[in-house]
Image (cartoon, rainbow, N blue to C red):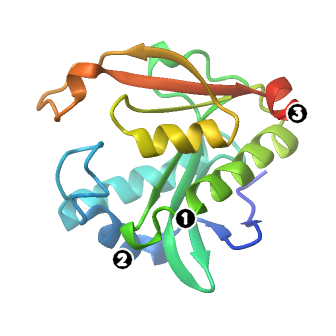
C-alpha cells in the first residue's frame, strides 16, 4: 500500500512530494517553529537534504511516510507516521512514530491534533499498527497537550546527547504512546 490521500473535516493530507519543497523551506525557516527541534531556523540547503530523507521515509514501510497538509488549498504544515529510527524506540514491526509541524500562523487552531487523529486512524485501521508513539522535548507543552488531546499517554522521560543543547534540553525528552486497543476505546 502506498501512502493514500487522507482527509479530515478541514485538512487534506497528501503524500509529501517534490512540489512541497518550498513549503518545507518556509516552515523550517521560522526559528519559533524549530525552537524545540534545532533551536534555530534551517537553511534552504539543510531543508533540501531533509526533504530527500522525508521522501525516502515512504519507501521504508508501505503506507507510512510524510504528508503535506492543506486547508482550503493553503499549506498549513506536515504530518508524519514513520517506523522507529532509534534502538530505544522499540521494534519496527507494528509501530510507527507520529509527528507534526505547522506554520506558526496555524498554531492553536486544533489543526495539529486534527491531522494527528487522522494519522492514528490510518495507522490503526488501514495499516493495523499495534502502537503509535510521539516524542518531544519535555518543555514543549503545546506538543505535549496535542499528544494528550489525541489519547496518547506519557510513557517515559529520557535524555538524548545534544551536540548543541537547546534551552530546556536538560529536562529531557518525553515519549507519549497509544496502542490500538487504547485508541479503540478513546
Mark 1–mark 2 Cα distance, whole angstroms, equals 12 Å
Q: Position of residue 53 (x, y in %)?
A: 41, 50
Relative to 46, is 125 above or below?
A: above
**Label ID, residue 28:** none
Q: Is residue 98 visible?
A: no
Crowding near the residue tagged with mark 3, few <14, some 14–19, many ≥20 C-alpha atoms within 10 Å: few
Q: Is residue 11 above or below residue 170?
A: below
Q: Residue at coordinates 44% horizontally, 46% vertically from top-left?
A: 142
The residue beneath circle 1 is: 16
- Could you tell me residue 15's position as x and y percent? 62, 64
Front residue of 141 and 99 = 141
Task: Tell me which label, 3 or 2, sits earlier in the chain.
Answer: 2
Q: Secondary structure at mark 3?
A: helix
Q: Residues within 10 Å of mark 1 (few under 14, many from 20)?
A: many
Q: Which residue is mark 3?
A: 184
Q: Residue at x 36, y 76 (%)?
A: 22
Give how far across and how far down residue 180 sits, in percent. 81, 28
Q: How many angstroms separate mark 3 from mark 2 (CA)? A: 37 Å
- Image quarter (top left, top right, bottom left or bottom right) of the C terminus: top right
Q: Quadrant of residue 133?
A: top right
Residue 22 bears which disc, if any? 2
Query: Quick check: 56 left or right of 35?
Result: right
Report the residue at 17% width, 52% height from top.
Answer: 40
**Quadrant of res 185:** top right
Amino acid at each position: 500500500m502506498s501512502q493514500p490521500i487522507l482527509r479530515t473535516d478541514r485538512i487534506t493530507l497528501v503524500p509529501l512530494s517534490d512540489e512541497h519543497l518550498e513549503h518545507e523551506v518556509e516552515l523550517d525557516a521560522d526559528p519559533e517553529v524549530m525552537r524545540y527541534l534545532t533551536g534555530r531556523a534551517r537553511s534552504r540547503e539543510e531543508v533540501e537534504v531533509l526533504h530527500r530523507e522525508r521522501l525516502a521515509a515512504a519507501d521504508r514501510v508501505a503506507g507510512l511516510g510524510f504528508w503535506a497538509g492543506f486547508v482550503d488549498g493553503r499549506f498549513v504544515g506536515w504530518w508524519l507516521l514513520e517506523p522507529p529510527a532509534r534502538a530505544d524506540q522499540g521494534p519496527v514491526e507494528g509501530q510507527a512514530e507520529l509527528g507534526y509541524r505547522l506554520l506558526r500562523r496555524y498554531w492553536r487552531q486544533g489543526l495539529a491534533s486534527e491531522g494527528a487523529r487522522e494519522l492514528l486512524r490510518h495507522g490503526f485501521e488501514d495499516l493495523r499498527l499495534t502502537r503509535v508513539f510521539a516524542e518531544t522535548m519535555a518543555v514543549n507543552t503545546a506538543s505535549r497537550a496535542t499528544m494528550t488531546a489525541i489519547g496518547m499517554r506519557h510513557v517515559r522521560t529520557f535524555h538524548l546527547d545534544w551536540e548543541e543543547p537547546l534551552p530546556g534540553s536538560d529536562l529531557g525528552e518525553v515519549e507519549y504512546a497509544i496502542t490500538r486497543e487504547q485508541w479503540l476505546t478513546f
